[in-house]
Structures are given as structure tokens and as C-alpha cells.
Image (cartoon, rainbow, N blue to C red):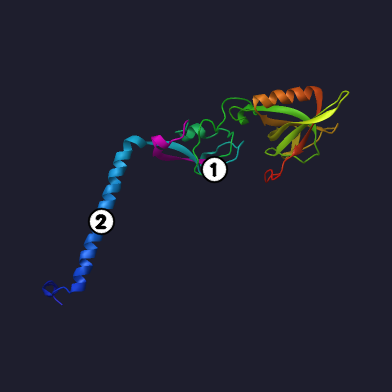
Amino acid sequence: MALRDLYARKWSRRSKAFAVVALACGLLTFRIVDGYAGELETLRPLAGSLVPVVVATGDLSRGEAIAEGDVRLERIPDAYAPPGSVHVTDDAVGQTLVSDVAAGEAITATRISVAGGPVASLVPSGLRAFPIAATVPAGSIRPGDRVDVIATYGGPHPYTDTVATGLEVLSTTDAQDGALVATADGTTSLLLLVTSETAEQLAYASAYADLAVSIASAKGDGV
């Protein structure tokens, strides 16, 4: 059929209706897209310009040194960049993480260590590492476990008191392959992450009581 014959044919009523509906849908789609574009332009001054932010390419654990392949740059609106964001990958590579980071999460100054020793570089801002000696079976505790510290006071009226609960074990001073190893006298040393107030309470208990620890479930306290 020649092209001129197609133009010469009269459209049926149904064809005309379909054409009108198609044209209306096209106009509606244009209006919606144009409206979204206008909203984005309105929000642009609020969101700010795009800035590079270093994010994790996969899940990273506290204590890991960030390798080159562990991070990448993403450009996000300035208003949505977390405070303290790292903007250059070289500033993150080689740094030790002081907290876990999920895949796609931004690397910030509070997540990486600053200059310091092997313990200080693992202590999150606002916390302290406090050592205690306790009698714990060899191999029963690893870094990351949580413990309660219990003090038994002597004297004419001996009593036992729970000094602190849910303290995270930062590291153990006597360990092999990450597992705790007891010393000859049966005591072990644990480095616990605590607040300044808890550190004072543990210091007092260490001076006047025998300390012991109970190990919390890895699934959380369901009691």
C-alpha cells in the first residue's frame, strides 16, 4: 500500500480515540517530568553542589587497616555529606578503623584512628581502654565479646556487687590467635572499653575487691 493511500484512509472512531489517549498520556508524562525537574532545580540550592566522599566498598571491621580496594569515591550533594567526611581516598588508606563500617557507608574522621599507639588507635572518641585482671578460663574470651564486671569485697561484712555491665573487650594482653590464654596464676588481663565514669568505678573496685567477669551472650541479653 502506497504511503499516500495511508494518509488518504479515514481513521476509525476507535483509532481516533486511541490517538487522543496517547497524546494525552504523552502530555501528562511531559508535565510530570517537567515538574520533577523544576522541583530538583528548586532544591538544588538547599542540597548544595556535589562533593566527593570516600565510602566503603564492602563491610569493614574495627581494627582493620583500610586497604586501597576497601574504599572508593562517590559524589553526593554537600548537604548530605556526613560531618567529618573524608574527601580523598589517600587520606583513608592505611588508617585503622575504630568502629565497624558497612558497605556504602561514608568514612569519617570519627571512624578512623589518629596518631597514637596500637591501643589508642582503636579507642573510639569519648571512651577509654581500662585494663583489669580476672580469673577467666583460657580460650573463653576474644576481642569483641562483652562482659559484666563483678567485684567481691572482703572485710567483716563481705559482699558482691556488679560494677559494670555490657563492657566490650578491646583486646587481651595474653592471647594466641585471638583467644585468651591464662597466666600461671590463673588470672588474665583484659582491656575493656569504658566511659570515664566507669573507669573510676573499676579503679576503685580493683583497689578494694577481687574482680571476676561474666560473659554475655553473643546474641544479646534476652533476660
Q: Residues within 10 Å of mark 2 (few under 14, many from 20)?
A: few
Marks 1,2: beta carbons within 8 A: no
Type of amino acid under label 2: Leu
Apparent side of residue 105 relative to residue 170 in the rendered image (left or right): left
Question: Relative to 201, is 23 above or below?
Answer: below
Q: Secondary structure at mark 2?
A: helix
At 48% from the left edge and 40% from the top edge, which residue is drawn? 55
Residue 81 spot, x, y in % from top left: 43, 35
Q: Is residue 59 visible?
A: yes
Residue 196 spot, x, y in % from top left: 65, 24
At 42% from the left edge and 37% from the top edge, which residue is drawn? 80
Q: For marks 1 and 2, give the CA distance.
A: 41 Å
Q: Secondary structure at mark 1?
A: loop
Apparent side of residue 140 relative to residue 104 in the rendered image (left or right): right
- The part of the image, by quadrant, that contains residue 45 is top left
Q: Is residue 49 visible?
A: no
Apparent side of residue 213 relative to residue 98 in the rendered image (left or right): right
Q: Say if the magenta span includes residue 150.
A: no
Residue 4 spot, x, y in % from top left: 11, 73
The residue tagged 2 is 28
Question: Relative to 119, is 104 above or below?
Answer: below
Quadrant including the N terminus: bottom left
Q: Which residues are magenta?
A: 70-83
Quadrant including the C terminus: top right
Q: Residues within 10 Å of mark 1 (few under 14, many from 20)?
A: some
Q: Say if the magenta span includes residue 75.
A: yes
Q: Which mark is residue 60?
A: none
Residue 6 spot, x, y in % from top left: 14, 73
Type of amino acid under label 1: Ala
Upstream in the sequence, badge 1 or badge 2?
2
Q: Which mark is residue 102?
A: 1
